[in-house]
Image: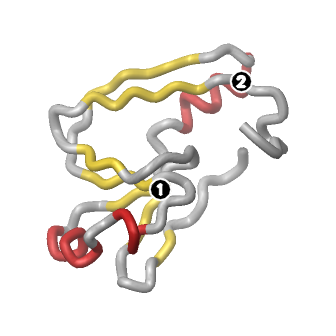
Amino acid sequence: MGAPPAPELHPSGLTIHPWLQDEALLDAVRADGRARWTLRPCDATAIVLGRGSKPEVELRLEAALADGVPVFRRRGGGCAVLLDPGNLIASAALPLPGIGGSKAA
């Protein structure tokens, strides 16, 4: 899918970093076309936004900035999630026809 996106700067001053935790999983599925999943513990507090999430709608921006909680954006959709130590992160990747140039999923 190419290089990961660069961090984005929200008008509030919040930096949104790309979520790279699933890149190895996605690369493996692209390589052989087999579905895979991972389950791993979370070791730090973070906010992860979906591809189309709007921080000004889904977050309390002032609190996120004041608390210094890192904010990431994943390539997949969905709403914002708060991760903290003790959470388990489950990720699944499925080989769908047309991925890479897909028009729908």
> Which element is circle 1 on?
strand
Separation (CA) of disc 2 from disc 1 = 21 Å
For the point 31% across and 54% down, the residue is: 47
Q: Picture coordinates of residue 84 (x, y %)?
A: 19, 43
Q: Which residue is mark 1?
A: 73
- In the displayed structure, 98 sits above or below 35; it is below
**Mark 2 in CB contact with mark 1 (< 8 angstroms):** no
Please give the count of numbered marks on the rendered protein.
Answer: 2
Q: Picture coordinates of residue 82 (x, y %)?
A: 27, 49
For residue 95, which numbered disc appears in the image?
2
Disc 1 residue crowd, few under 14, some 14–19, many 20+, Cα 10 Å: many
Amino acid type of the residue that numbered disc 2 sits on in the rendered structure = Pro
For the point 59% across and 26% down, the residue is: 93
Q: Picture coordinates of residue 8 (x, y %)?
A: 50, 72
For residue 96, which numbered disc appears in the image?
none
Amino acid type of the residue that numbered disc 1 sits on in the rendered structure = Arg
The disc, 2 or 1, on the residue closer to the chain's N-terminal end is: 1
- In the displayed structure, 105 sits above or below 35; it is below
Q: Nearer the viewer, residue 57 or 3?
A: 57
Q: Quadrant of the N terminus?
A: top right
- In the displayed structure, 23 sits above or below 54; it is above
For the point 72% across and 37% down, the residue is: 105
Taking the image as shown, residue 30 lies to the left or right of residue 47, namely: right
For the point 82% across and 45% down, the residue is: 103
Disc 2 residue crowd, few under 14, some 14–19, many 20+, Cα 10 Å: some
- In the displayed structure, 10 sits above or below 47; it is below
